[in-house]
Amino acid sequence: MTLLSLHNIRKSFGAVDVLHGVDLSVAAGEVVGLVGDNGAGKSTLMKTITGIYRADTGSIEFDGKDILALDPGQRRRLGIEMIYQDLSLAKQQDVASNIFLGREPTKKVFGLFPGFVDKAEMDRRATRMIERLGAHLPSINRSVGSFSGGQQQTVAIARALTFNPKLVIMDEPTAALAVREVQSVLDLIRRLKSEGIAVILISHRLNDVLSVTDRIVVLRHGRADADLVTAKTNMNEVVSRIVGGGDISAAAAHEQRG
Amino acid sequence: MASETAQPGFWARVQRASVERLHIRLESLVVLVALSTAMALLSPFFLSLSNFLNILLATSTIGVLAIAATFVIGSGGLDLSLGSVMGLAGVAGAFVAVNLGWPSVFAVIACILAGSIAGYINGQLVTRAFVPAFIVTLGMLGLARGLALVISQGRAIYGLPAEIVYIGQGRPLGIPMPVIIFVLTAIVAHCALAYTRFGRHTLALGDSEGAARAAGIRVEHHRRIIYTLSGALAGLAGLLFTARVNAGDPTAGINYELTAITAAIIGGTNLFGGRASILGTMIGALIMGVLQNGLTLLAVQSYYQQMAIGAVLILAVFIDQYQVRKESRV
């Protein structure tokens, strides 16, 4: 069943054309790797899915609904979450504030005044989510900026998973992590898949992409240049599709070592 | 040093609890108490109920402006037009009541509305025209002051109706009306900033605009509301001031933005946004009030008071930045 389908997405910034008609589809519970050289348009494409950017032309359907006109908040509510490369955390706020940012539960105070944020409920659910991820944070009442990179990423992941998403987009989730932390992120992706949650993984680490994805889409010059089934491809083919000819074997050998 | 970070001392724990629970920086409370003690020792007139009410009365106008400054700075913005918009609002209210002779209710509405419109224009320019807030509100500082002088033809408008004067000079139960309005405004503002989604989004916005946008907060829309709110509060301050001095003075509120921003910063508002509390700002406003009141009681010329406020602003930002640097080093 197709969860997300993009058709002929175009996006330009002023005179710079970034996306020239991208087609992409993701099925429910499918893990799709999105690879491509720097400047191929990966992040721009993902931001048109989350609604941070609005596509100039084309159509985006999610769960059978046309979502092109929706803003980021509305798309989140439909179940599209993204973990940004820079994590996009509010560093001076605490863990629960970040996880629930934009979706704070509210309660009535003295049974009279509505609209008060239910901080106790937020803290409770945040603690449960962090525990479910098997992570340890010094204190959930500390500002997120005082945490290490891996701990901050835990918060970003918890934020993406708390509201039962259908699709999680991860932009370079392993780029800044230690080896053991990388493994736990890959395990997490497998777990999401087993729970029926679709994942789009953007990564330069092709070994990671080859090990967890079902399909690999190569973005090149603003187009989906190749759509490969992971089980039927290999490092050489992916690299050659990314660089598009030229000295493929040298580049592939470099990746193998990498 | 290492043992200190592992086992935070009593003072550090009290500090943290104070910031987390009450949203108050303990240092500012210490400064307020120390300053009050010093003034009480230096002047025999300082410690009295009437002087206490005097301080609150003088603080009420600045305090309302400081609440506005807290919201704007907390959201990562800046409003330099507070004092001028306050002056414009007061003149607008007096013009409606005296020159047009309309009922007092309309004068009150005119004050708030004039402030809101100025703030709304600030917000539109900041979010749509991509002019930095510093420039937009600096321009509005000139625009609003000029318009106040144009409307009043450069002279104060006298002869306000009794209802308006009551807002500034009335004393139900012996408490000055501006103080009551100021305290009520502060309570509502505190709840809005600390406990509602609106307040949380405001601080998140000041913390990281990217994070707020990614979380689905309508960033530009929220900024426009903040600037409009800031203008409306400046309008309220204008009403309080005009009613208290019983005149629509086009030069009212000159340099008040300096004091208001200083009060907000002393109260623990991060100059670059993301951290702010109304309770803290109230302590900051009281510090400014006590400072001005004490210096007046000690017969220090007002020129020196101006210098003192400027120095306090720089000192407060210095201390704040020093602590931020120290914390990030640990």
Image (cartoon, grey):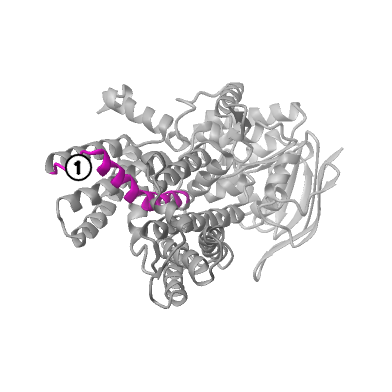
Residue at x 14%, y 41% (from the top left corner): B44
Residue type at mark 1 is Phe
Which quadrant is the C terminus of chain A positioned in? top right
Confirm whether residue A128 shows in the render.
yes
Q: Position of residue B295 (x, y in %)?
A: 19, 51
Query: Picture quarter containing residue B139?
Result: bottom left
Query: Is A251 positioned to the left or the right of B230 in the image?
Result: right
Q: Give B12 or A89, whichever is nearer the viewer.
A: B12
- Residue at the far left in the pictured view: B42
Query: Is B14 positioned to the left or the right of B117 in the image?
Result: left
Q: Indicate whether residue B159 is drawn in magenta.
A: no
Q: In terms of secondary structure, what is the magenta stretch mainly?
A: helix
Chain under label 1? B
Q: Residues within 10 Å of mark 1 (few under 14, many from 20)?
A: many
Confirm whether residue A157 shows in the render.
no
Name the element at disc 1.
loop
Q: Which residue is identified by label 1?
A: B46
- Residue at the far front in the pictured view: B162
Q: Position of residue A246 (x, y in %)?
A: 67, 59
- Range of the magenta residues? B43-71
Query: Is B260 positioned to the left or the right of B204 in the image?
Result: left
Q: Indicate whether residue B57 is drawn in magenta.
A: yes
Q: Give B282 or B293, whichever is nearer the viewer.
A: B293
